[in-house]
Amino acid sequence: MASETIVRVSAIISTYNYAAFIRDALDSVLGQTRPPNEVIVVDDGSTDETADIVASYANAGVRYVH
């Protein structure tokens, strides 16, 4: 019997005050031919709108770690 290999893909995006770019980064990752199983945004204490923008992707399964 042949066994199938299960491949899981995670995308981790690090950010700090990059609200101007985070939407483009998330759209790019989620728009891949083979989207990742999980997307994690790791924020190093942003003081701009980064958290609000990432929160708008919660329905797409994006996790936010601040």
Image (spheres, grey):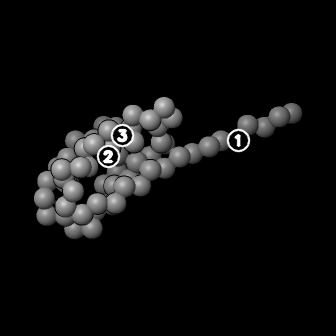
- Which SS class for mark 3? helix
Residue at the disc numbered 1: 5
Residue found 62% across the figure and 43% down from its top = 7
Disc 3 residue crowd, few under 14, some 14–19, many 20+, Cα 10 Å: few
- Circles 1 and 2: CB atoms closer than 8 Å: no
Disc 2 residue crowd, few under 14, some 14–19, many 20+, Cα 10 Å: few
* Residue at the outermost right position: 1
Q: Position of residue 25 (x, y in %)?
A: 32, 46
- The dot on residue 43 is none
* Residue at the outermost left position: 48
Residue type at mark 2: give it. Ala
Residue type at mark 1: give it. Thr
Camera-nearest residue between 55 and 19: 19
- Circles 2 and 3: CB atoms closer than 8 Å: yes
Question: Does 9 sit above or below residue 41?
Answer: above
Residue found 22% across the figure and 68% down from its top = 45
Quadrant occupied by the N terminus = top right
Residue type at mark 3: give it. Ser
N-terminal of the pair, mark 3 or mark 1, is: 1
Quadrant occupied by the C terminus = bottom left
What's the distance in space between the residues labelled 1 and 2, CA to CA?
A: 28 Å
Which marked residue is nearer to the observer: mark 1 or mark 2? 2
Q: Position of residue 55 (x, y in %)?
A: 23, 47
N-terminal of the pair, mark 1 or mark 2, is: 1
Q: Position of residue 57 (x, y in %)?
A: 28, 41
What's the distance in space between the residues labelled 2 and 3, CA to CA?
A: 5 Å
Q: Position of residue 46 (x, y in %)?
A: 19, 64
Question: Does 57 sit above or below residue 52?
Answer: above
Residue at the disc numbered 2: 25
- Which SS class for mark 1? loop
- The dot on residue 28 is 3
